[in-house]
Amino acid sequence: MVEFDIVVKNARVVTPMSGEPANGVSFSPLEVYDGVDIGVKDGIIVEIAPSLDGRGKEEISADARLVIPGFVDPHTHTVFGGQRAKEFVWRLTGIPYMEIRARGGGIMASVRATRAASFEELYECSLRRLQEMMGWGTTTVEIKSGYGLDGDAELKMLEVIAKLAEELSLDVVPTFLGAHDIPPEFGDDPDAYVEKVEQMIPEVANRGLARFCDLFCEHGVFTPEQSERVLRKGEEYGLLPKLHVDEFVPSGGAELAGKLSAVSADHLSAATDSGLEAMANAGVVAVLLPGTSFFLGLSSKPNLSLMKELGLKVALGTDFNPGSSTVLGMPLIITLACLHYGFTPEEALVASTYNSACALKMEEKVGTIEPGKQADILICDVENIDEIAYWVDHNPVRVVIKKGEVVKRECV
């Protein structure tokens, strides 16, 4: 008989299950297990049963409260220097993002601050942000570079991400986003900067500093043709393609994501019907970022009904960054997805766990509570998932178990 390291007692488990949903279904159905125990050993969920009494070195009572998988945040820009509160005030006066960008704000403001920051400064502030994310229940997080926009600064960011991955129990997934914007020194020649990004890729890949290659395919930034050049070069060196696309206007980005069979395409507020269809046909995960729409006050929103009709797998992320989404916690993202994008709470939970794991190609490891999966488990102070969306900006997470280790413990 197995002796477990941890047994979570008397849990009301609500979880997606591994495997593809029925054909043409965007969100897997949820399984519910009332009053069960969860046995964890060596960081892995080993058994879920009505009673595992006396078999755990440590027992944690869920007191019949909600137990869900750890949140997977598939889109963040957590490593950056400085802040951009001034731009927040500009937006309150009605100045749109692209005009702020033209004034030297936007991404380039963070580029200047990040280039000026030391490795240690970037590490310390990013560590604090990740610790706060973990307190909100995030147990797996993707982090992009992209505020360096030159070889040295991009490598500095990726090295910070690598150290964070070593030091924290979180699963940290690194993404190279060298083509986040066009730096001013290349302002009149974006093709020259695309060539520069292509030249960065071999060192990034050979040093194992990224798993994905991402870029900003948007009008006024990178065209689909320039984007394809960068992502093809990334694939040549083993970096899987991701894209920021169609955030403000249709850019052809969703179509390109389908053409490349990208792992995910993110934002998608202005994606065309044909672009979404191309993504669905290629199995691209749609990562939606309602915190960004909320923070920027955008009226446009992704066409969730068409995504569901097409059977696109839909995930949710925070897009945490200094300019367009300062949201650190996934519970608020779930609320915003329900209020502004038309998700049900059930869909939002799947999109924040299993589907978001698919957006990082980690679905075999995280995103569900079932035997054989990594023990990333949240014990919440609510009884059902509707309450996660209902209690606005409330942190329902009382206990966080990551890889079988308790990393947050409060009274349930």
Image (spheres, helix red, strand yellow):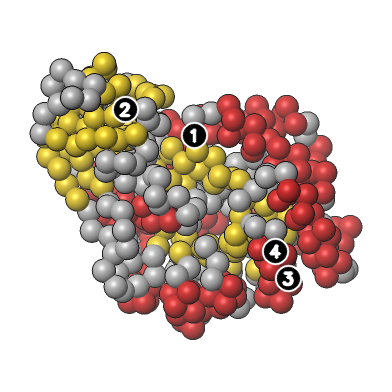
Q: CA distance from mark 4 to mark 2?
A: 39 Å
The image's mark for residue 41 is: 2
Q: Residues within 10 Å of mark 4 (few under 14, many from 20)?
A: few
In x, y percent, where is residue 29? 23, 58
Question: Label 1 sits on what residue type?
Answer: Leu
Q: Residues within 10 Å of mark 3 (few under 14, many from 20)?
A: some
Q: Nearer the viewer, mark 2 or mark 1?
A: 2
Q: Which numbered disc flags the more N-terminal residue, 1 or 4?
A: 1
Tag 2 secondary structure:
strand
Q: CA distance from mark 2 to mark 3?
A: 45 Å
Q: Nearer the viewer, residue 224 or 4?
A: 4
In the rendered structure, the answer to whether residue 250 lies left or right of residue 236 reads: left
In x, y percent, where is residue 189? 87, 69
Determine which residue is flagged by label 4.
Answer: 236
Q: Residues within 10 Å of mark 1 (few under 14, many from 20)?
A: many
Determine which residue is flagged by label 3.
Answer: 229
Q: Which numbered disc flags the more N-terminal residue, 2 or 3?
A: 2
Residue 169 lies, with reference to residue 179, above or below; the image says: above
Residue 69 lies, with reference to residue 21, above or below; the image says: above
Q: CA distance from mark 3 to mark 1?
A: 33 Å
Determine which residue is flagged by label 1.
Answer: 170
Total tally of numbered discs in the picture:
4
Q: Nearer the viewer, residue 102 or 10?
A: 10
Q: CB of mark 1 within 8 Å of CB of mark 4? A: no
Question: Label 2 sits on what residue type?
Answer: Lys
